[in-house]
């Protein structure tokens, strides 16, 4: 055999082998109904046939920017299913694949058509040779089948062609599987929908009249599953009143080949009436001859009943709305009753409708609606109702009688009584409130009437609404009368009255309040403008104290009423206030009754001031009396001292004068002795003159009127210091002077006090070198205390009580000159200023004197 013949034979063998593979391939894919399973089988078979290392199908995601490998075949290499970026494969091949052109590479490392990035991508998948077949769907690149080898491989044309053929058959098998899956799912969903909707399926052969149907269809017509049910049975089930209409609809559908769609009533074997909806379509032959009808049936009984209930409900609501519109504008209870009775009577076609109320042992009928009947008005005994009716009425049950004459529960006398007033059918509706039978509604027909539950419910609604409207009208009438009384009182009372609405922030804290209502006295008592209503308190009084908002806010939040008196500086008024919440919990309105008590408060303040002044005057008078008593005591002491002086101190120099004058007269012959005696007489006269001058100075101090003003004691201290220094000559004195206060007093006499105390300190410390004189002041709430201390001779503290008596001296005249009047003068001056004077000492170590002066008060100054 020639080389050419052998080659042809090899080629024929290859084609035969591929044909055999494709038959096997088709047989493997044919039973598969899952697209994923088709892809897995296809790549496995192709990979095994070609001896490839890795075969995969990659789909393009919806965004077109990634590969998704869900199924692959891997032999000796790991499976690489997953999501990859578009650049992970041979990116330079994308335009070729998007154009629907397949590609093959024998060696990725040496193929000149591949870029460096493509070679790197192949290396990342351990691929040296590959065949790629693209899938174009709807003009878009949708997927890629790729055969890959880890080593270089020269792909034959037959292998490339086989790969293309497998790809095309795989795409077709996948699309078929997906379409069959979608169809199967649609059929399943349709069956689920039919089952869920209780749709019965039926079909009719128009030439034979044979009908077949599902068990659901049988159930729609009241049959059990598997029961015989043919076309004649169907027509027998249709309600007689609807058969003609249904026949017309069927004939029209067959004649015109239009869809059949109708609703009708059917009678089930148990005699109950139901409704069905039937829809069908006519199937015609090629010549247009109707061959069959098929369709579905649906039991719509519940829907029709719901529609009927809805219709009746709408009619009832329309009637009640009409009734409400009729009675709403009425304010007279009588008009409400007559209108409600008329509207109900006309709606029901009743002959008489009446409304009654229970008063004691009678039921009272004031108004009727009548149509061809006699009116019944007046008072009737409650006992005229039968015991059974009364029992039902007290329980709040409605009593309905369709035919009085035929009712077995009515006694003959009751039937006769009803016949006498023309009642052949009735309904008595009772109204029971808080367990008490209080009113009712009676509806009468002159002919028997079959009461429906809807009519009974309607009558009960009308009874309740009529009673509610009548009570509302009566309450509104009472409210108007009450409001008239309130308005009269509101406008005539002298007290201010207002209602405010508390305003809260997001945290629930009161921040202001708005005036909602106010009486005429409000403006007069608050001083606020007449247009205050609708405005807030802080709008009207920007500086209003927080107390008012917090107090009224607390009333609104807690519901606790408050009564208080308080002043508003911002309004310059005192108010006596009572505040209480209006409404229940959650209400933000507060009612305020108030009075302007500013005049009363001013009067109380005036009285308090008068009482204070009176008490101050009494206190002043008491203090004056005490001062006068103290002054009198001092005067008495001074008088006693004066008497003692007259009897002792003044007599002593007189005795000296008299005695030595006699001695001088006896010694006239001795001039020297007479001169000495006369000198003693002169000294006694001078001593007596000094004592008399001291007494006169003390007397003048007590009689002189004080000129009170502000006196700076520092000025007096400086002047007294100069006076003492001038008298002391060159004797050394160390002065330690503190800051003294300003006081209320007489400047002249206080200068005498300061000078006498400093002279005393200088005189009794003249033997010290140096003499030390200290002056300072101390303060408390009521007075100032001025101290003068020296380091002089001091005195025995046991004799301190004699210090301030007139002519009282604790040292001999030869030691320290003086009259004993100075400290008496100090005490008298300080006492007249309302103060006190004291002294203490240690013999040989010095003495301390101090006096007090009261601080100024609002009462009168010292005398």
Image (spheres, grey):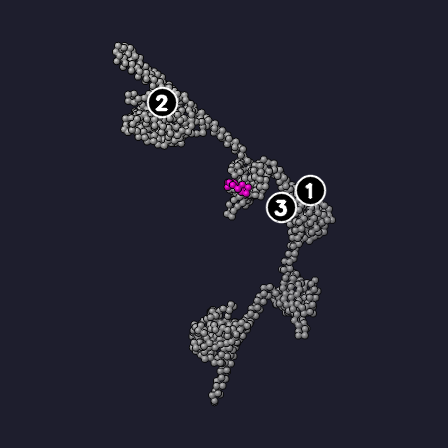
Q: Is residue 2 above or below residue 383?
A: below
- In this view of the protein, which residue sits in the foreground, 658 or 486? 658
Choose mark 2 or mark 3, whichever is in front: 2
Q: Residues within 10 Å of mark 1 (few under 14, many from 20)?
A: some
| Residue at the disc numbered 3 | 432
To which residue does mark 2 refer? 824
Residue that label 1 marks: 379
State yes or no: residue 545 in magenta.
yes
Tell me the element at label 3.
Answer: strand
Earlier residue among tags 3 and 1: 1
Say what secondary structure mark 2 lies in.
Answer: helix
For label 1, the SS is strand
Q: CA distance from mark 3 to mark 1?
A: 20 Å
For the residue carrying disc 3, how many other residues have a C-alpha within 10 Å: few (<14), some (14-19), or many (20+)? some
Task: Residue at 53%, 71% (x, y): give it.
Answer: 140
Camera-nearest residue between 652 and 104: 652
Q: Nearer the viewer, residue 310 or 98?
A: 98
Q: Quadrant of residue 537?
A: top right
């Amino acid at each position: 055999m020639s080389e050419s013949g052998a080659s042809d034979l090899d080629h024929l063998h290859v084609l035969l082998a591929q044909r055999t593979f494709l038959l096997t391939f088709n047989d493997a894919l044919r039973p598969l109904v899952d697209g994923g399973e088709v892809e897995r089988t296809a790549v496995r078979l192709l990979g095994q046939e070609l001896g490839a290392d890795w075969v995969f199908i990659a789909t393009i995601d919806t965004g077109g920017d990634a590969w998704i490998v869900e199924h692959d075949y891997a032999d000796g290499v790991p499976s690489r299913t997953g999501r990859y970026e578009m650049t992970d494969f041979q990116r330079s091949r994308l335009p070729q694949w998007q154009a629907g052109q397949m590609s093959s590479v024998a060696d990725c490392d040496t193929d000149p058509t591949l870029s460096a990035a493509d070679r790197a991508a192949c290396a990342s998948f351990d691929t040296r040779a590959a065949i790629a077949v693209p899938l174009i769907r709807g003009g878009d690149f949708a997927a890629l089948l790729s055969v890959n080898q880890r080593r270089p491989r020269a792909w034959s044309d037959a292998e490339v062609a086989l790969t293309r053929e497998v790809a095309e058959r795989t795409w077709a098998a996948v699309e078929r599987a997906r379409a069959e899956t979608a169809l199967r799912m649609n059929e399943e969903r349709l069956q689920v929908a039919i089952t869920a909707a209780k749709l019965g399926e039926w079909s009719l052969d128009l030439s034979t009249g044979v009908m077949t149907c599902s068990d659901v269809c049988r159930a729609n017509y009241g049959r059990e599953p598997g029961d015989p049910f043919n076309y004649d049975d169907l027509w027998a089930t249709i309600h007689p009143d609807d058969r003609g209409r249904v026949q017309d609809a069927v004939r029209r559908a067959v004649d015109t080949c239009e869809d059949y769609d109708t609703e009708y009533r059917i009678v089930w074997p148990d005699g109950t009436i139901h409704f069905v909806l039937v829809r069908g379509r006519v199937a015609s032959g090629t010549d247009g001859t109707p061959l069959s009808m098929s369709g579905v049936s649906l039991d719509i009984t519940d829907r029709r009943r719901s529609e009927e209930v809805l219709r009746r409900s709408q009619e009832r609501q329309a009637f009640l709305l009409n009734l409400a519109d009729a009675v709403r504008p009425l304010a007279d209870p009588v008009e409400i009753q007559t209108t409600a009775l008329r509207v109900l009577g006309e709606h029901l076609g009743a002959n008489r409708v009446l409304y009654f109320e229970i008063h004691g042992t009678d039921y009272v009928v004031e108004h009727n609606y009548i149509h061809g009947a006699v009116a019944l008005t007046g008072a009737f005994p409650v006992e005229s109702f039968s015991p059974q009716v009364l029992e039902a009425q007290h329980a709040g049950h409605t009593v309905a009688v369709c035919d009085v004459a035929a009712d077995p529960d009515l006694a003959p006398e009751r039937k006769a009584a009803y016949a006498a007033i023309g009642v052949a059918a009735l309904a008595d509706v009772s109204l029971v409130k808080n367990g008490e039978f209080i009113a009712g509604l009676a509806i009468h027909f002159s002919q028997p009437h079959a009461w429906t539950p809807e009519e009974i419910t309607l009558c009960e609604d009308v009874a309740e609404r009529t009673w509610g409207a009548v009570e509302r009208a009566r309450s509104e009438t009472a409210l108007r009368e009450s409001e008239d009384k309130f308005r009269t009182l509101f406008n005539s009372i002298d007290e201010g009255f207002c209602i405010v609405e508390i305003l809260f922030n997001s945290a629930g804290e009161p921040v202001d309040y708005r005036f909602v209502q106010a009486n005429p006295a409000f403006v007069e008592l608050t001083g606020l403008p007449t247009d205050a209503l609708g405005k807030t308190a802080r709008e009207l009084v920007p500086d209003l104290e927080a107390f008012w908002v917090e107090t009224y806010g607390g009333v609104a939040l807690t519901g606790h009423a408050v009564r208080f008196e308080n002043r508003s500086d911002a309004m310059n008024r005192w108010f006596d206030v009572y505040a209480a919440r209006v409404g229940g919990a959650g209400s933000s309105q507060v009612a305020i009754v108030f009075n302007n008590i500013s005049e009363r408060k001013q009067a109380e303040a005036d009285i308090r001031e008068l009482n204070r002044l009176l008490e101050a005057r009494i206190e002043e008078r008491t203090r004056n009396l005490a001062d006068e008593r103290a002054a009198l005591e001092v005067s008495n002491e001074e008088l006693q001292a004066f008497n003692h002086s007259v009897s002792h101190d003044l007599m002593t120099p007189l005795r000296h004068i008299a005695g030595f004058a006699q001695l001088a007269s006896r010694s006239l012959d001795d001039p020297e002795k007479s001169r000495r005696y006369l000198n003693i007489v002169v000294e006694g006269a001078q001593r007596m003159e000094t004592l008399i001058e001291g007494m006169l100075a003390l007397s003048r101090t007590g009689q002189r009127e004080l000129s009170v003003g502000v006196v700076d004691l520092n000025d007096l201290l400086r002047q007294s210091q100069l006076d003492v220094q001038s008298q002391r000559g060159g004797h050394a004195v160390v002065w330690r002077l503190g800051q003294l206060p300003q006081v209320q007093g007489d400047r002249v006499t206080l200068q005498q006090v300061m000078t006498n105390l400093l002279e005393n300190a200088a005189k009794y410390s003249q033997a010290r070198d140096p003499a030390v004189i200290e002056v300072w002041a101390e303060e408390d709430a009521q007075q100032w205390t001025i101290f003068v201390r020296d380091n002089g001779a001091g005195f025995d503290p046991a004799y301190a009580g004699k210090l301030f008596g007139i002519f009282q001296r604790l040292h001999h005249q030869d030691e320290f000159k003086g009259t004993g009047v100075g400290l008496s003068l100090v005490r008298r001056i300080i006492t007249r200023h309302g103060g006190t004077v004291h002294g203490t000492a240690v013999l040989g170590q010095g003495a301390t004197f101090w006096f007090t002066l009261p601080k100024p008060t609002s009462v009168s100054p010292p005398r």
